Image (cartoon, helix red, strand yellow):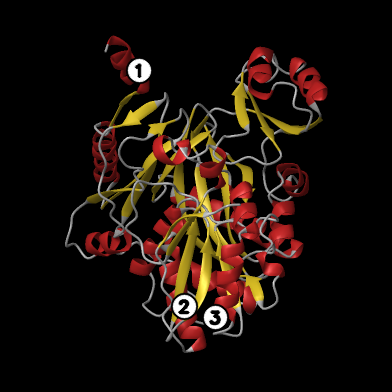
Amino acid sequence: MSSIHFSNFQIDEGKDYFLYIGELKNYGLNCFLKEALTRYYNRKFEFIAIVPDVLEQYNYDNLIVINPLIESSGGDCLEKRSCRINASDFMAAVSQSKKIKSLIQQILRRQPNLYLYMYESLSEMTLDEIPNVSILGPDKHIAQKTNNKTFQLTQLKDIVPTVEFKICKGYNDLIQTTDMLWDEWSDGIFVTKEYSAAGINSLVAHNREEVEDKFGKNDVTYIISRFIPHTLDPTVLAVVANEEDIFIAGVADQRIENGNRFTGSTYPTTASSEHTKQLKAYTRTVGAWLAKQGYKGIFGCDYIITHDNEIRFLEINARKQGTTLEFCCTLEQEIPINAPNLPELEFYAVVEEVFPANTREIASDAKKLHWGTYNYKIHEQVKTQNYIPQGIGERESFKKVADGKLKKDYLILEHIGTSFIIAQGSFLGRIIALGHDHESVAQGITQGCQIIELTFISHNTVENEYARV
């Protein structure tokens, strides 16, 4: 079960290792962590990345690809289709892999303990039950509890200004409650399950039919809230070590489509300095609350700024954000050389429960770095007919733009390759754009999208051509 699709790792006898387990897009975070561990333990560290991403080819060192969807499709997934798997199933597959367990034993024969580093701490990850193996991140059970939206909103409603919400116990309660609110909440009702990310289990609805179409008769707990027209969707990335030690990495603006679909972020936020200061203050308050729950590590908070210039808290992401790597690259250019970056701060939060004395937040944007991310999502089934060479120099691009060697730059990452059928709703690639103003960033995103669009055609077009032949 869960055989390895791709592997190119080599163990260097002169180094200690940790395992990264998560999506390929966060591969670069491990470079920051290995440098931090090398400083802390005064011995060289390296990592092996275990990822689910099925691509045509890989330009990454020390990589293992595991994706059980390849097996369940009888190989069809590997040859023809993208294989996007949810994080829980991937973590379970990695935990059950005999080859990964054998690798762990091989590493433990060389070093006294082994860290597992993940994008999100999930209960399906059980490899930490092996003696001398531990998760370098938030406790997985605490992360699961604090990621629950019902728990978040009921606990935080008197601590920070939240949106107006109600809890619905089951599908019938959802329908009955929303039926009473359509006229009162006339701008729409945001409906979400207790666990949702990037809009997967949520919807901005305007009538009963939209709710029924989205959720069927799924009898779970739902959270509904009044949809408030707003001008910005700011998000704050932070790290918490204890109730006093809460590090704010920065504030970005999310790009939200159709009220609930996250497609990327831009930095720095366009919110006013007063709003930015308040967003950071609210996030420190939330971080202190997380610390009381026992949570230690990286987290994010999402907000809206209404047309009336009021800030409303939406949710905590008790995990790393999709732009954690971009914030790491920004911090590297803006904070003192020896100050700890986000993976190092998370390490200290988990191991020492306090930040090091030389911790520094960004005091000013001296390099005037601007960046944006865009997750290119397919809206109809397509087939790729070209590929984009894989570049992994995001950290280097940030430095060149920060140093003025480049005025602007953009990268296209994780393009799946040629001759893949991509299902509607799947990601085809990711764009990172850099510059010294938002206009340059917008140009980079647009150009990246145009290049990606040259790599595929509608799958219906392909089928019609075959039919004519």
The tag earlier along the polypeptide, 3 or 1, is 3
Query: Is 63 left, or right, of 104 in this rendering?
Result: left
Q: What secondary structure is marked by label 2?
A: helix
Q: Is any atom of residue 136 visible in this view?
A: no
Q: Is any atom of residue 269 visible in this view?
A: yes
Report how many numbered discs are placed on residues in the image.
Answer: 3
Label 2 belongs to which residue?
36
The tag earlier along the polypeptide, 2 or 3, is 2
Query: Is 261 left, or right, of 93 in this rendering?
Result: left
**In the image, is residue 440 above or below residue 226?**
below
Quote the CA–CA distance across marks 1 and 2. 51 Å
Between 461 and 293, the one lying in front of the other is: 461
Between 34 and 361, the one lying in front of the other is: 34
Q: Position of residue 301 (x, y in %)?
A: 58, 50
Between 54 and 146, the one lying in front of the other is: 54
The tag earlier along the polypeptide, 1 or 2, is 2
Q: What secondary structure is marked by label 1?
A: helix
Q: Residue at x 63, y 22 (%)?
A: 214
Residue type, numbered disc 2: Ala
Asked if disc 2 and disc 3 are in contact, CB closer than 8 Å, the reply is: no
Residue type, numbered disc 1: Glu
Label 1 belongs to which residue?
463
Task: Kindly identify which numbered label has been placed on residue 421.
Answer: none
Q: Position of residue 134 (x, y in %)?
A: 65, 72
Q: Residue at x 50, y 44 (%)?
A: 234
Q: Residues within 10 Å of mark 3 (few under 14, many from 20)?
A: some
Quadrant of image for the C terminus: top left
Label 3 belongs to which residue?
356
